[in-house]
Image (cartoon, rainbow, N blue to C red):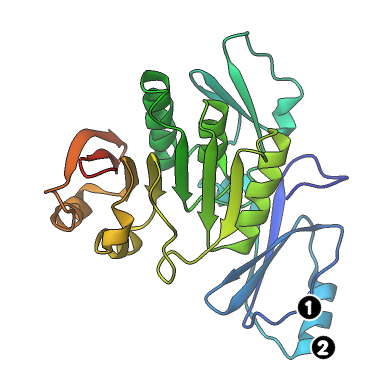
Amino acid sequence: MLKSPYTRYDQLYIYNFDRVDLEKIDDPDLIGTWIEDDTTILFFHKEKQALVDTICAQTEAKILYQARLDYQDWEAGLDITTFTVPPLTVAPLWEAEQLIVDEESIPIRLDPSVIFGSGFHPTTRLCLQVITDLLTSHPAEIRTMMDMGTGTGLLSISAAKLGVKEVRAYDNNPFACSVAAKNMGLNDCQGQIQVLEADLRKALPETGVDLVVANLYKGLLLDLFQNQDFWKAKYYIISGFIPSMEEELLAALPMDQLKLLERRKSECWRLWLLANSNFQ
């Protein structure tokens, strides 16, 4: 995450350790700590070889890989800049102070960090577009929402800004939860959104809400589809898959209780909007 004296991301210095039991890293150039698959990934603004050598000597950890990347390369070659999905205007922190919006626009300030969900991946943008369409056309129907795999928290913040009263935002990455929580604070949404760390495979939360947003990968979607407790919401926005995956995913849907309201695409990615006829 951005903290003084840094106001934007430029170079990323990445160190992947072979263990997760490292002590807390207190360094002014640290962006964040990512735990994944029994490894620890540290992101810095500056080169930290001396610090890394000290960590390895003290803990007997080994470096699996290390890299230096331009931030734009981390973001798949994209320049993270201000964009609009009416009525929302999303600005990264380094452009937020210069942001000028008209009285009909809703500004969102975002620290994208190194977490998925900056708004520039096609699936995130598709979800954002459908959320805005659904909430502007059916504002009274959508009062509660669950965001599965919240990342930066952008989709949850957008829903809150558009009138959703209660949002639960889940991610299994503690670093993502920290980034999302920061972004909730930047947009004064703490009272509407609860950020929760959870592995959805192991403990599926109560899904009896008006809207579930699940922008996830195919394997996790299939696991969720096969769990009857997943199908308790009124509406579902499902994304994170490409056309070659659709047949298998469609076959896993309980179509006796679902109606496919809309199918959208962007580049090679797809999204479904589903309604649940059994919603109570």
Residue beneath disc 1: 23
Q: Is residue 143 visible?
A: yes
The disc at residue 58 is: 2
Point out the image quarter for the C terminus.
top left
Q: Residues within 10 Å of mark 2 (few under 14, many from 20)?
A: few
SS of the residue under disc 1: loop
Q: Quadrant of residue 12?
A: bottom right
Q: Relative to 38, is 277 above or below?
A: above
Relative side of 190 to 236, left or right: right
Residue 117 visible in the current orientation: no
Residue located at (62% from left, 8% from top): 103
Who is closer to the viewer here, 78 or 35? 35
- Circles 1 and 2 in contact, beta carbons < 8 Å: yes
Q: x%, y% of residue 197?
A: 57, 61
Q: Position of residue 159 (x, y in %)?
A: 51, 33
What amino acid is found at the position of numbered circle 2 in the picture?
A: Gln
Residue type at tag 1: Glu
Residue at point 83%, 74% (across, down)? 51
Does residue 238 sit above or below 55 in this rendering?
above
The residue sitting at 35% across, 63% down in the picture is: 220
Disc on the earlier residue, 1 or 2: 1
Residue 251 percent across, percent down from the top left: 13, 56
In the image: residue 240, left or right of residue 188? left
Residue found 38% across the figure and 39% down from its top: 210
